[in-house]
Structures are given as structure tokens and as C-alpha cells.
Amino acid sequence: MGSGRWRRAAYGLLAGAIALQGVATSLSIGNAARRLPRELGDGFVDYASWMDIEFAPAAHHLGDRGYVEYVSDVPYASMWADQARSARFTLIQYAIAPTILGHIPLPADEPQRQFLLADFPDAAALDAYLEANPCEVRWRRGGRALLRRR
Amino acid sequence: MTAPLVLHGIGPVLLATSLVWKAGLAPGGRWGLGLGSLQALALSVGLAGFSGAMARLAVPALSGREWLWETPIAVAVAVWALRTSEVGRLREVPGPRGWALAVGILLAACLAVSLGAAVLAIAQHLSFYAHGTGADSYGIWNLKARFLYRGGVRVWRLFDPLIMHSHPRYPLLLPGLVSRLWSALGHETTLVPRGLALAFFGLVPSLLVATLAALRGWIIGCLAGLGLLCLPFFVENAWTQGADLPFSLFAVAALGCLALAMEDPRGGRGALVLAGVFAGLAAWTKQEGLVLVLASLGGVALGSRPVLRLGIKRAAFVLAGSLPLLAALFWVEAAYVKYRPEYMHGGGGLLAEKALSLERHGQIWAAALRFVSGPRQWPALTLLALVALAGLAARRGASPAQRPLLAALGVVAAGYYAAYLATPYPLAWQLSTSVDRLFIQYWPSLVLLAFIGVPRDE
């Protein structure tokens, strides 16, 4: 009987510790989330617009038109490793792919402007898009890509 | 909007419910409404993602209309399940009474508070960081979803080695699910991957609690749920929108089904098949799922006595469940992926050299020890180890599910160890970016294993 009581007491303590740790962990995560900084500042167009221009033909065209400022000395690998800036990765990746990463072998039957899948079948479609959604794209040193309303 | 959502939902839900019903987990069946519904929900989500991706790859011209062939198959399976299922019943776990009831209510309240805080924190992150907080969400999973959704007849570009950073070989359950929901809604929205991240997070503790509640009672179920939430980055992983947490759902569902089958006096053949299906869905979520399939087979074979007569027979049921999903996975590989597996670079000689490198073994052990002793991990891991020890000390009512689960997780550990040894990427980088995520994949299963050893009445 005696050992049974001790065993139950030990189980009770263990259960209590699990309950406390579980609640404390979640509450501390919840509390930290209250002070979470917003990633995007004022002036950003919503992410959906970002995603629409992420594919390379569009980005390449944007570069030709001077919408995108390429910073050719930012090494690709450092952006990959930098998790803090990773939110901009996809756009940057596609924006630089045809230019800075021009050494990537493209398939012979795939002209560069059709690199990957694009929502914009040609430059005119992209121009029309930009006409309807005035915006300015800048890629700054440090890997930050911004799409701002004009 | 409602009609396409219903059309997209009816096939997976009907198919999943039929399979769960047939396995005996149905409402009013062997294992009760709570567990049956959650198993069916997890299975529906998995089948919807699998079917969404497969349909877009098999018949790209009909992208977004997978319900055309899915619904008739689901209806046929439902009729078969209704006509052939047998009603049985697992030994019922008596509900808590007296002081135990008070403890149970207190623990349930703790679990509710804990889950509520976690869900609010995840929702806050998902609202501020719409595309997730890690590169994998938008660089891999949601990127693939956009290819599936927008691709049509050009969907093959998804596998283009030009976008090697997105790992074209990765399986497509999660992107399939996202793109399918976009099809149902009629447009792309980040609400879908965000909603799915929250849903997957909610399903994991729910399924774990329900499985243990069915086998060990509500007190143990609630304690396991709280034990799961003791690990901070299990919660934090939800807002990355990665595939590790969805993987952990299918892993704990598969191993939970193995446990249910082992404790079923009638043999639990249906649950074994279901375990195979869940393991197959894990293989469709991440490549590591192939290890889970092997682990489920190995676990059930090695954990049964006698191994040759009973173990292999049980493993055959698990294999039957995962075989269709594996066949589909290999078809995608053969039809679309046109480059060699990364792990084969350098050939067998290099692999042997890596396997014999003491430095690599040392690096892996050091990373594992660093992880286990990390300040944010050790409280959860210590408590779990104590639970496992308490189960061993009690001895009474040793669970027939313990050995298969232990064997399965042993196979998983061995598989991951071998993968680290053979990795074509720099080992230090690979370890630093993946040990925690791999741990998350099996954290719910480890909690299941620890608590399954605790006798019912403790």
C-alpha cells in the first residue's frame, strides 16, 4: 500500500509538471506574439501583387524598363543563408535569375523571356498590368525588394 | 463559391469516412465518435491533397476538376464499406470517477488554455507574416502550389531543374491541397496556406489526445496533449507554413493506427491498412515519408510475435494501404523528374567513404546532443523521458503497442542517421538547418510512444 501511495504521488507530481510546463510554454509563446513586429511597412502593395511579378519574364522586363535596380555584387548564396531577409527571397530569386545568374544554362527551346511560367505572356500584358496597378519596384542593396504604390 | 467547395470536398470526405468506417474507427463503431471523426478528417485532408496534385499531373488539361473522377470512386468505396464492414468494439476505457474526474477536468482546462494560447499566437504570426516565416513556404511549397494552380498543360515546368532551389523532386501533397482549395475558391489567396497551417496544427494534438483517450483514458490523453505543447518550436513551426507539421500529423496518425491495431483483440486489420495509407500520405508530404513507410512495416513486423507468422502478415496489411500511394509517387518520379537523385551523386564509392568517416559520425552525434540539451528542448524531453520511465516502472498492463512503436521509431532514427551520413550537401549546413525540423516530424509520435506505456488506471 505504502509504495502504491508513493507511486501515485510521483505520478501526480509528474502530471502536474507536464501540465504546468505545457501551459507555461504556450502562454509564453502567446505573450511573445503580442509584441510581434509587422514585417511590412506602410506603402507596400499587398503580397498578391508581389507574387504576380515574381516570375522571371516579368522581372526581366521590369529590369529592362528600369523598374528594378539590380545590385550585382550581392551574392546569391548569402541571400539563401540569410533567413532574416528570406521573405523577399522568391521575388529576388526570380528578379535576378536571368541577369545576375545568367550563367544558368537555359534550355535551347526556351527563350529567356519565357523562362518559367509567367502570368504575363508578353511585355504588353505586363505593361497593361502596370498601367492598371501603378507601382514602382526597387531592389536595393541588402536584398530588399520593394513594390510601392506610386 | 459554395458549390465548388462542396464538389471538391465530397470525394475526399466520403472516401476517408468510408475507409475509417471500414477500419472500425467510425462513429458508433469500435473506437468512438471523437477518434473516428478526427481520423476521417486527417485522412480527408491528406487524400484531397494527394488527389489534387495527382489529377493536375495526370490530366493537366482538366486541372481543378478532380472531383469528376474522384466522386464516383468515393461513392463506390462507400457502398463497399457499408456492405462489408463489421461492427466490433475495443475494450472500453472506463471514464474517470471521484477525485480522478476532478483531475481530468483540471487537465482538460489546462489543455484548453494551452491550445488556445498557441492557436492565438499562430494566428497572430500568420496574420503578420502572410507567406510564412521560413524560405520553404514561399520558396518551395507555395511556389509549387502556384505552378499546380496556374500551370495547366505547362505544369511540367514545376519539375524544371532551373528552379533547383525549390527541390523539384519534393512530393506534392501540400501544394496539391493549396492549389485545390484555390481552384475551389476561384482565385489565389494566402488565406489558404495560412488556414491550412492552423488546421494542421489543430489536428495534431487533437488526434494524439483522441488516440490516447481511446486507449488509455481521458486523463492520459490530456496529459499527452500538454506534453506535446511543452516543446516550444513545435508550436512555432506552425507559422512557418512548412511541411514538417503536416508530416507529423500523418506520422502520428499512422503510428496511432498501428497502436490501435495492436491493442485490438480482433487483430485490427483495417487499422493496419489505414496505418499504411497514412504512411503513404506522409511519403506524399515529404520524402522522409518513405522512411516512415519502411518504419511502419518494420515496426509491425519486428514488434509482433512470432515475427515470421504474425509480423509479416500484419506488415502485408500495412503495405497494402501504402502501395497505391507509393505507386503514384513513383509514377510522378518516372514521368516528370528528369535528373538523378541528389543522394546518388558521386556513386557508391563516395557513399562508402562517407559512411566510414568518423568525422561525419561525430558531427551527427554532436548535433543531436546539442539539440537535446538545448535550453528550449530539455524540459520537454526530460518530462517525456520521465513518463516513459514511469511506464516501464509500472510494468503492469504492458501495452502490445509499445514494441512495434519503439521498433518503428528505431527504424526512423536509423534511416535519418543514414541520410545524414550520405547527404550530398555540406553536413554541417544540413544538420544546422534540419535537426529541429526532423525532430518536429516525430515529436507527436514520441509523445504517443511515451504515454502508451502508461497503464490505464494510473
Image (cartoon, helix red, strand yellow):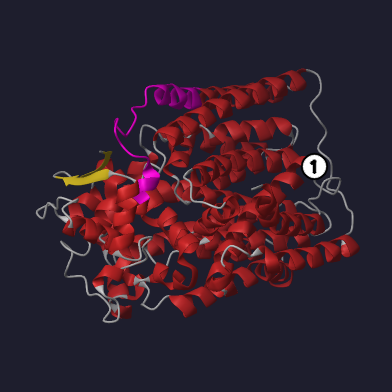
- Residue B156, position in %: x, y? 43, 73
Give the residues drawn in magenta, as a range: A24-51
- Residue B29, position in %: x, y? 85, 49
- Residue B32, position in %: x, y? 81, 43
Which element carries disc 1, helix, strand or loop?
A: helix
B449 or B35: nearer the viewer: B35
Subunit under mark 1: B
- Residue A123, position in %: x, y? 28, 63
Is residue B436 rendered to the left or right of residue A44? right
**What type is the residue that disc 1 sits on?**
Leu
B347 or B236: nearer the viewer: B236
Is residue B400 rendered to the left or right of residue B342? right
The residue at 61%/42% (across/down) is B203
Residue B442 seen from this side:
yes
A61 or B264: nearer the viewer: A61
The residue at 68%/33% (across/down) is B220
Does B370 sit above or below residue A15? Answer: below
